[in-house]
Image (cartoon, rainbow, N blue to C red):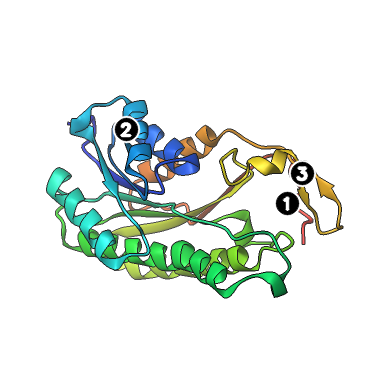
Amino acid sequence: MSAHGRVAVVTGAGSGIGRAAAVALAADGYRVVLAGRRLERLRSVAQEAGVGDERVLAVATDVTDEAAVEALFSRTREAFGRVDVLFNNAGRSAPAVPLEELGFDEWKAVVDVNLHGMFLCARAAFRAMKTQQPRGGRIINNGSLAAHVPRPHSAAYTASKHAVTGLTRSLSLDGRAHGIACGQIDVGNALTELSARTAEGVLQPSGRVEAEPLIDPAHVGQAVVHMANLPLDANVLFLTLMANGMPFVGRG
């Protein structure tokens, strides 16, 4: 058993921010369910967490597959009895190309993961949190600075993350009566596989290509733990965590 007995589900847990959050939650005493498409990566994260099989469970999951998401939460409850925290983290981006060159399949793939997948996981978490005893729990959605302002050539990703903000607000409202809190963390330039090219240079609104600073994803993991550990009568509705020197303020 963990120190406090709480259970956290982390999607997209095989790399990047999901990995950092899963390791941080495990270190804080959570029993952690790792969800992602590649089981071998999840097992690597489980080993890195170093808390033993009795406190970590890896479940291969495609968050765009309704049946797979339902199976994920069913296995979580079978293994650990409840769901206290969902870090709704799984996401993807599209190629940074002019809008007229963006394929519809690429657009749909981004929306499927970033919005539909987040909805499916939140819905499953709501069902668990409303019926378990003690009732309630917390959902933390991974938004992005793109939920506020776009980068050039990012229509699919930016639109999906703006939609996540609407989902966060709706979940926060609809969860109140059931002891369910929902907040969103918007991260800028954490060093992950998706953002590694940022250090080499990315297109700016001015048309120039410039390198940008990056931060350790471990800082994001600690922020997720802070949000997760709040009592359910308190909520961080939106938290922005970014590389201090990045061109966010004034971007657009």
Tell me which numbered mark, 3 or 1, is placed earlier along the sequence.
3
Residue type indicated by callout 3: Gly
Q: How far across and how far down the image is residue 127, in percent? A: 22, 65
Viewer can see residue 168? no
| Residue beneath the point at 74% across and 39% down | 200
**CA gap, disc 3 to disc 2?**
33 Å
**CA gap, disc 3 to disc 1?**
15 Å
Reading the image, the residue beneath label 2 is 46
Q: Residues within 10 Å of mark 1 (few under 14, many from 20)?
A: some
Eye-nearest disc, 3 or 1? 3
Residue type indicated by callout 1: Phe
Viewer can see residue 22? yes
Q: How far across and how far down the image is residue 84, in percent? A: 27, 49
The kind of secondary structure element at disc 2 is: helix
Tell me which numbered mark, 2 or 1, is placed earlier along the sequence.
2
Q: Is residue 150 left or right of residue 82?
A: right
Q: Residues within 10 Å of mark 2 (few under 14, many from 20)?
A: many
| Quadrant position of the N terminus in the picture | top left
| Residue beneath the point at 32% across and 28% down | 47
- Nearer to the camera, 230 or 239: 239
The answer to the question of whether label 2 and label 1 lie on touching residues, with beta carbons closer than 8 A, is no
Picture mark count: 3
> Does 172 appear above or below 235?
below
Reading the image, the residue beneath label 3 is 201
- Nearer to the camera, 96 or 217: 96
Reading the image, the residue beneath label 1 is 248
The kind of secondary structure element at disc 1 is: loop
Q: Is residue 113 left or right of residue 249?
A: left
Residue type indicated by callout 2: Ala
> Does 55 appear above or below 177?
above
Eye-nearest disc, 2 or 1? 2
